[in-house]
Image: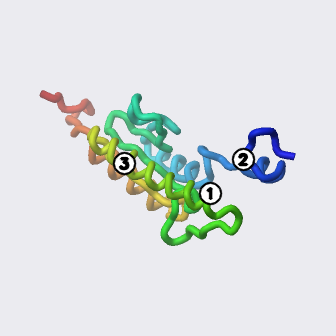
Amino acid sequence: MPPEGSWASSAARRRNMQAIRSRDTTPERLVRRLVHAQGLRYRVAARPLSDLRRTADMVFRPTKVAVFIDGCYWHGCPQHYVPPKTNPGYWSDKVARNIARDRDTDERLRAADWLVLRFWEHESADECSESICQAVNSRRPPRLSDGSETPTA
C-alpha cells in the first residue's frame, strides 16, 4: 500500500520514482569529467542566481555560464520523448511544465547576462564538453604575458 496522501499508485511505483536521480546522472558525470580534465572548475547543481530557486548542472560563476544536461523523457526531447501509456494526462502535463520552466529559466538567466548552454542526455559527452570549454574560455578576460588578467576599467 502506498503511504497515506501519496500520489504513487503502488509501493513499487513509489520506490521506482524515488530511485530517479535529479543530479549526478551518468551523462552529467561524463561531461563534468571531460571539462574538469581541460582545467576548468565549476559548481555542481548550484543556483546561478541566488534569487532563482533553480539549479544548473554546472555553473561557471566568473564567466556567467550555466550548463544544463536535460534528460530526454523529463524535458521532452523532440527525438526521443515518448508519451507515457500509464496516467498520460499527469505525466504529459508534468513534462510540459518542465519545458515551460526550462524556457523561463533560460530567459531569466539571459536577462542577467548569463550564457545558457543546454544539452540532451543523448548528445556526445565529447562534443558537449568541447562546446562548454569554448564558451567558458571565450567569456574569460584576456590574459597578459605574465599570466595575470587584464585590468578592467
Q: CA distance from mark 2 to mark 3?
A: 30 Å
- Left or right of residue 17, residue 106 in this image: left
First in sequence: mark 1 vs mark 2? 2
- Residue at figure coordinates x 33%, y 39% from the top left: 64
Q: CA distance from mark 1 to mark 3?
A: 24 Å
Q: Amino acid at mark 2?
A: Trp
Q: Nearer the viewer, residue 88 or 61?
A: 88
- Residue at figure coordinates x 20%, y 35% from the top left: 144
Placement of 150 over or under 81, stated as above or below:
above
- Left or right of residue 51, residue 80 in this image: right
- Residue at figure coordinates x 54%, y 59% from the top left: 121
Placement of 138 over or under 84, stated as above or below:
above
Residue tagged 2: 7
Q: Amino acid at mark 3?
A: Asp
Q: Are marks 2 and 3 in contact (CB under 8 Å)?
A: no
Q: Residues within 10 Å of mark 2 (few under 14, many from 20)?
A: few
Nearer the camera: disc 1 or disc 3: 1
Residue tagged 1: 90
Nearer the camera: disc 2 or disc 3: 2
Q: CA distance from mark 1 to mark 2?
A: 11 Å
Label 2: element kind: loop
Placement of 103 over or under 56, stated as above or below:
below
Q: Amino acid at mark 1?
A: Tyr
First in sequence: mark 2 vs mark 3? 2
Q: Nearer the viewer, residue 100 or 69?
A: 100
Residue tagged 3: 106
Q: Position of residue 110 (x, y in %)?
A: 30, 45
Label 1: element kind: helix
First in sequence: mark 1 vs mark 3? 1
- Residue at figure coordinates x 25%, y 30% from the top left: 148
Q: Quadrant of residue 65?
A: top left
